[in-house]
Image: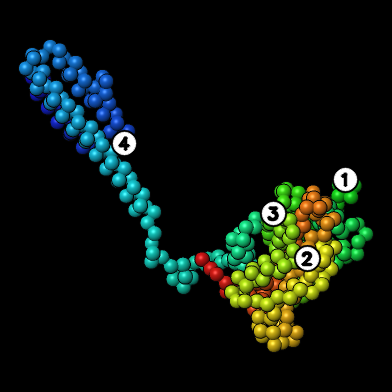
């Protein structure tokens, strides 16, 4: 049989074999069998030296054409296998846009998002867009982080303002008694110690106080702490940030005012009020007919607190605030009793965003 004939046969044989393959590894193996250094095509070409001059002239180009054609077949096959895989994947991952999760149609109850989570996510987005980081901290704290570093020494009356859940801690080293944090200001301390000014962060979290509960008091509630430290930070900066954030949260221009407020870790300290959104300041039961609603305590960070956080008070100062998340949720959704938030009652929870 002439070599040309042999090559043609190989070509056909290859064509037949590759047609039946369905995975890439087999295709590559077949390619090696024919086109590899020791492959069938190379073997034939090796005997080229025995061929006549005339045959050689014809054989060279013919061999190249056949090799090219085989390469092309390999490429086409690999592409079609890949396409097939993608199509299969797409078919499996198909999204059923007619899918419904309504309880009526599926009989399945789906979870929802707690209103507190909804507002927290919204507030986090606003602060992130203003360059704030989001920090976290432990629920179980020691006296240092909850009190001392915040300018509240052992005998300070302010400790009574925050009725504390203490742990029985007979083995703790002297003075380092453990407690459930009474406020998220603990994270101010951790934040200051872990970064260099200038910085700004918020820290949302659950806090605990040993209090009698009523419509506006819970033992477990949520705050969102905020802190900004830098050069020449002023009360005007504080007011600007608060006003901008509250306007975003309530989706309308809010008016704010500051009243003096006492917290050992800020000096001066303020209570920030907003003009009542229910009655626009005319006076109603929500604002107790004053036209203003107390919303968040804040102030310029006390130098003792900055020092405890390792910050150079000659160069830097800052502001801090503590947003009462639960009150904000209540204001935004018109909830009249804080205890609903923790009740776990599905009739309450399912009124908010569900999946
Ligand atoms: N930590 C204070 C509280 O829980 C709130 C606060 C935070 C006040 C920051 C001023 C500045 O009562």
Residue at 75% over, 84% down: 290
Percent position of residue 269, x then y:
81, 67
Q: Secondary structure at mark 4?
A: helix
The disc, 3 or 2, on the residue closer to the chain's N-terminal end is: 3
Give the spatial CA distance, label 1 vs label 4.
66 Å
Note whether residue 342 is visible: no
**Mark 2, residue position:** 299
Give the spatial CA distance, label 3 vs label 4.
54 Å
**Mark 1, residue position:** 173
Percent position of residue 75, x then y:
26, 36
Residue at 6% over, 17% down: 54
| Residue nearest the viewer, comparing 145 with 301 | 301
Query: Of tags 1 and 3, which is closer to the observer?
Result: 3
How many other residues sit within 10 Å of disc 4, few (<14), some (14-19) or many (≥20)?
Answer: some
Give the spatial CA distance, label 1 vs label 2.
33 Å
The disc, 1 or 3, on the residue closer to the chain's N-terminal end is: 1
Quadrant where the N terminus lies?
top left
Answer yes or no: disc 2 within 8 Å of ligand 1: yes
The disc, 1 or 2, on the residue closer to the chain's N-terminal end is: 1
**Mark 3, residue position:** 199
Q: Secondary structure at mark 2?
A: strand
**Mark 4, residue position:** 24
Q: Classify residue 81 as left or right of residue 114.
A: left
Query: Of tags 4 and 2, which is closer to the observer?
Result: 2
The disc, 4 or 2, on the residue closer to the chain's N-terminal end is: 4
């Amino acid at each position: 049989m002439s070599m040309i004939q042999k090559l043609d046969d190989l070509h056909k044989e290859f064509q037949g074999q590759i047609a039946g393959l369905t995975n890439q590894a087999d295709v590559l193996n077949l390619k090696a069998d024919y086109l590899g250094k020791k492959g069938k095509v190379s073997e034939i070409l090796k005997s080229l030296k025995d061929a006549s001059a005339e045959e050689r002239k014809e054989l060279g180009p013919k061999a190249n054409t056949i090799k090219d054609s085989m390469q092309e077949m390999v490429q086409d096959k690999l592409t079609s296998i890949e396409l097939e895989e993608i199509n299969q994947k797409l078919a499996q991952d198909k999204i059923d846009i007619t899918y419904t999760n309504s309880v009526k149609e599926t009989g399945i109850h789906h979870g929802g998002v707690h209103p507190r989570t909804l507002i927290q996510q919204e507030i986090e987005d606003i602060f992130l867009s203003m360059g704030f980081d989001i920090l976290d901290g432990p629920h179980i704290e020691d006296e240092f982080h909850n009190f001392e570093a915040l300018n509240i020494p052992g005998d300070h009356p302010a400790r009574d303002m925050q009725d504390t859940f203490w742990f029985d801690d007979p083995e703790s080293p002297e003075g380092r008694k453990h407690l459930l944090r009474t406020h998220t200001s603990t994270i101010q301390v951790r934040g200051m110690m872990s970064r260099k000014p200038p910085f700004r962060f918020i820290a949302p979290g659950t806090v605990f106080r040993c209090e009698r509960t009523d419509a506006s008091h819970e033992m477990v509630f949520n705050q969102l702490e905020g802190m900004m430290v830098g050069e020449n930070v002023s009360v005007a900066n504080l007011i600007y940030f608060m006003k901008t954030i509250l306007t975003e949260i309530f989706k309308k221009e809010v008016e704010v005012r500051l009243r003096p407020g006492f917290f050992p870790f800020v000096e001066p300290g303020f209570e920030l009020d907003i003009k009542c959104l229910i009655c626009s300041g005319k006076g109603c039961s929500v604002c107790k007919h004053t036209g203003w609603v107390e919303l968040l305590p804040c102030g310029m960070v006390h130098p003792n607190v900055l020092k405890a956080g390792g910050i150079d008070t000659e160069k830097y100062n800052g502001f801090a605030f503590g947003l009462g998340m639960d009150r904000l949720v209540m204001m935004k959704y018109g909830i009249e009793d804080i205890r609903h938030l923790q009740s776990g009652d599905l009739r309450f929870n399912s009124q908010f965003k569900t999946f």
